[in-house]
Image (cartoon, helix red, strand yellow):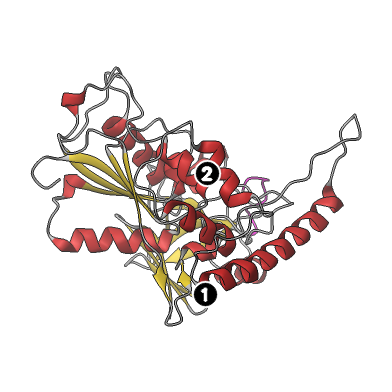
Amino acid sequence: MKDSGGCVAVICSTVGRAQEVFQRLKNSGYFIEDELGLFHGRFLFADRENIESNCIVRFGKPSDPQTNRPHRYILVATQVIEQSLDLDFDLMISDLAPVDLLLQRSGRLHRHEERKPEDRSSQLQDPTLWLIRPKFDEDGKANFGDSEFIYDHHVLLRTWLTLSDRTTVALPQAMDELIESVYNLEISPPEELEKIHIEDWYTSKEKHREENRAYKDLAKKVYIPSSTGKHKPFEFTRKRENDDDNTIIAVTRLGEESVTTVFLQKTHAGTFLPRGKIQTIHLNQTPDFKTTKALLANSTRISKKGLVKELQKQRDEKPIRKWTSTLLKYCCYIELDKNNKAQIGKWEIVLDSERGIVINST
């Protein structure tokens, strides 16, 4: 790719991992500024809109006059890349995810049929998805890293075992077979599997069933019956949504709690907004609609475990009393210093122009 070019998407399971991968690529020295980008759900909304627009320009349809596809570009992203954006990549590298999500993800490869072969790198003429192999513990058990914070271990294990020996997949022909091999809980593990993987299969399968029962019990409490009185059983494939990449959490999903958080910058001269034309904010005045929009443009969703509780505690103990509108009254807030940093409990928060909101435990 260094010489022949190409547009590549690197899909990470969590925001933190995406930020780390982006930084490592940047520090490698192989790419100039206009050849590397980052896209995830923990950017301020104002920044995220700009990133989405730039993605459409770089990877949009050839027939769109605004499309200006680069010769070489790597976009590091999370699942947000799959949400409503019509993008086309020559190559994709992905953390392991449930097989159905990988199939959906692969739909961003060579997506635009009107793009001519000569418009792609000679080395990337076939749609190609590279999966990152799991690590293995000392006893040989598969360890899926950050992906296990998001997805069920049993589903990841069966996805890996289903795909690990394949070099090609014919779509859509193989789609039903692949999904069946991962989600049919009546299927037994292959006899030739190593003992540690067979044990892991059955142990994680039972845990998977227990979690599904918990989901179903919760769903019954909020279930609205259909007019026919019939409904189909369901199973959940994900333990929780990606950190800060989920804007709406269904009540039947045991997802981690998230909060909309407005970012303010407090100095000796007053309170300001990091982005936008409206900069000075008077917290002792009720914001009008224009100011409310500006405040929300300087917000993002945060679901980092532990930090959410700290933000809610701060909101309740030190409320901004003039934020009475429906759009603002449940928002949390973070006050940055002049270096775009804040300390909330044990959490250090940094607003970084390239990486978005960076959260570290101190």
Judge whether residue 247 can be spotted in this image.
no
The region drawn magenta spans 321-327
Q: Amino acid at mark 1?
A: Ile
Q: Residue tagged by mark 2?
A: 178
Along the viewing direction, whichever of 43 and 26 lies nearer the viewer: 26
Magenta-colored segment: predominant secondary structure: loop
- Asked if residue 135 is positioned above or below residue 88 in the image, the reply reads below
Q: Amino acid at mark 2?
A: Leu
Along the viewing direction, whichever of 103 and 140 lies nearer the viewer: 140
Closer to the chain start, of discs 2 and 1, is 2
Drawn side of residue 241 relative to residue 273, left or right: right
Residue sitting at 67 percent across and 63 percent down?
Answer: 208
Q: Residue tagged by mark 1?
A: 196
- Please state the horizontal and vertical placement of residue 164, each as a whole percent of the image: 41, 55
- Asked if residue 57 is positioned above or below residue 299 in the image, the reply reads above
Q: Are marks 2 and 1 in contact (CB under 8 Å)?
A: no
Report the quarter where the N terminus lies. top left
The quadrant holding residue 65 is top left
Drawn side of residue 359 relative to residue 191, left or right: left
Q: Secondary structure at mark 2?
A: helix
Packing grade of label 2 (10 A; few <14, some 14-19, many >=20) is: some
The quadrant holding residue 109 is top left
Drawn side of residue 110 relative to residue 14, left or right: left
- Please state the horizontal and vertical placement of residue 5, each as a whole percent of the image: 14, 40
Q: Is residue 233 magenta?
A: no
